[in-house]
């Protein structure tokens, strides 16, 4: 329904901005390692470590296809065998642009050597053990840190949330598997 006063067809509705994230994983001397990229020269979370590749899902594209495209564009790799890790619903405030749904994928298989392909947006790549995220010279993007910690602990569910008031399941940083038993009757 279009708001008769503003003409906004989305007035009062949840408008979702979807994004796909690719976590390249490998086994290292200290256990499972993830490839992270330092965000540099960007408006959002500049100076934070983030997934090796991530970006918005484009119109007419699946989240899965976006993950493949972002890995090619941002890391120069292809042939990924993607596995869905979690879908995170998150929010920051009342603005429609802050209502997000993020699709996180992992891959232990790819072709090519990961490299920085967008040097104006990157401060470099680093493989880091999931148990050693605190050793990074800088913070990890907060909602991505929740996913990485859940991956490390084996507690991340198929559905997770971030930024919602109230704490507990659905609160800031909360992750849980969304199943029928969690739904209110």
Image: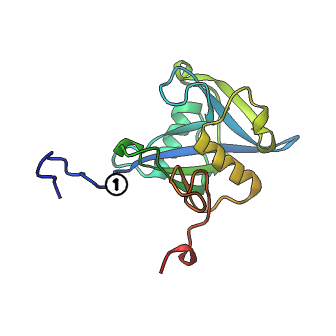
Q: Is residue 79 visible?
A: no
Q: Is residue 3 above or below residue 45?
A: below
Q: Residue furthest right?
A: 29
Q: Is residue 65 above or below residue 159?
A: above
Residue 168: which quarter of the image?
A: bottom right
From the viewer's perspective, tell me whether residue 34 is left or right of residue 182. right
Q: Position of residue 111 (x, y in %)?
A: 65, 39
From the viewer's perspective, tell me whether residue 16 is left or right of residue 174. left
Residue identifier under label 1 = 14
Q: Position of residue 118 (x, y in %)?
A: 53, 23
Q: Is residue 28 visible?
A: yes
Q: Residue furthest front?
A: 166
Q: Foreground: 17 or 21?
A: 17
Q: Position of residue 50 (x, y in %)?
A: 61, 35
Q: How many marks?
A: 1
Q: Residue at 56% of width from left, 19% of height from top?
A: 119
Q: Residue at 59% of width from left, 62% of height from top?
A: 169
Report the colour scheme: rainbow
Residue 141: which quarter of the image?
A: top right
Q: Residue furthest bottom?
A: 185
Q: Residues within 10 Å of mark 1 (few under 14, many from 20)?
A: some
Q: Position of residue 177 (x, y in %)?
A: 60, 66
From the viewer's perspective, tell me whether residue 114 is left or right of residue 103. right
* Local SS, label 1: loop
The quarter of the rendered structure image containing the N terminus is bottom left
Q: Residue at 55% of width from left, 59% of height from top?
A: 170
Q: Residue at 75% of width from left, 38% of height from top?
A: 133
């Amino acid at each position: 329904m279009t708001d008769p006063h503003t003409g906004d067809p989305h007035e009062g509705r949840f408008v979702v901005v979807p994004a796909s994230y690719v976590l390249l994983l490998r086994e290292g001397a200290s256990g499972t390692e993830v490839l992270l990229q330092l965000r540099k020269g960007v408006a959002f979370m500049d100076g934070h470590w983030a997934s090796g590749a991530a970006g918005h899902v484009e119109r007419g594209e699946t989240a899965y296809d976006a993950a493949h495209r972002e890995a090619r564009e941002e890391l120069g790799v292809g042939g990924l065998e993607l596995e869905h890790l979690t879908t995170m619903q998150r929010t920051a405030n009342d603005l429609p642009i802050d209502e997000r749904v993020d699709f996180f994928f992992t891959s232990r298989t790819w072709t090519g050597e990961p490299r920085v392909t967008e040097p104006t947006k990157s401060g470099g790549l680093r493989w880091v053990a999931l148990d050693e995220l605190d050793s990074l010279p800088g913070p990890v993007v907060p909602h991505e840190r929740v996913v990485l910690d859940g991956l490390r602990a084996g507690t991340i569910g198929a559905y997770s949330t971030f930024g919602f008031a109230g704490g507990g399941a659905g609160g800031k940083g909360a992750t849980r598997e969304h199943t029928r038993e969690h739904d209110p009757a």
